[in-house]
Amino acid sequence: MKEHKLYLGLEKGVALVTAGSRGIGRAIAHRLATEGMTVVAASRSVSEPEIVGDGRIESWAHDLGDSDATGQLVQKVVDEFGRLDVVVLNTPGPRILPVLDTNWSDWQLAHDLLLRPVVQLGNAAGAVMRGQGEGSIILLSSTWVRQPAPGGVLSASYRSAASAYVKALASELAPIGVRVNQVMPGATGTDRMQGILEMKSANNGTTIEEEVAKVVKDVPLGRWAEATEIADSVAFLASPRASFITGTSLVIDGGAVRAAH
């Protein structure tokens, strides 16, 4: 990963990044650590602590599907490090299915992965940051909230609910100096994207290269994003450099989803 010099004013802070062992979550954890932060990367996969420049990444075992553990995670970070400055609410993707192929258990599982943990962690982090009088919460969402894709009904539905939640949280926490924003990546080169392409290739009788071409043909910049590009934007929003930005939704998709305002 590309290294950066310290410049965002995050050094010596403490961050929590959920689903932080792979893909965009891992890129965000690494990026925040380059700014001198202590980053708790919570995920089901655990690795050794990593020193990154003046910061470090602590890998904590955590399953977002465990409601009781998720309810205690924020306080565990505060107990260990004394404060919490940044929380990145990242959640794993649910199954890719046509609407009529879903059953109620799919919806229940998607709720338990995409919405409940966001509310639990957002409420807990908001309460801690309210006491501190400062902090930044960022939801990692998806452009599917604005423009659902075929097979993405579970993700689009529950991420839309999470999006509404963080907008309300932003309004309530702004007067005390706590900022809440969301980032909406489009197609990004991750292991999950590779898996989706392989599934589509098998279902459609096409090559992975043909499926990639379908993904990027409507992206004006002509490619998909790298995870590090999403991480750079998250780090900026988390930092004092974005001190007058709250309640916003930042779309990072190379221009694929265009809106009038």
Image: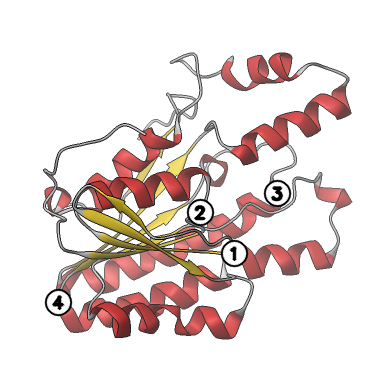
Task: Look at mark 4 in the image and give the residue it sits on.
Answer: 133
Report the side of 138 relative to 110 (left or right).
left
Q: Which mark is residue 44?
A: 1
1 vs 3, front mark:
1
Give the residue type at disc 4: Gly
Measured Cα–Cα span from mark 1 to mark 2: 8 Å
Residue appearing at x 57%, y 73% in the figure: 116
Give the residue type at disc 2: Ser
Label pair 3/4, CB-CB below 8 angstroms:
no
Q: Which mark is residue 76?
A: none
| Earlier-in-chain disc, 4 versus 1 | 1
Q: Which mark is residue 21?
A: 2
Question: In the image shown, does 54 or 152 lie closer to the viewer?
Answer: 54
4 vs 2, front mark:
2
Residue 219, above or below 42:
above
| Earlier-in-chain disc, 2 versus 3 | 2
- The x, y position of residue 11, in whole percent, is 14, 57
Secondary structure state at the residue bearing disc 2: loop
Secondary structure state at the residue bearing disc 4: loop
| Earlier-in-chain disc, 1 versus 3 | 1
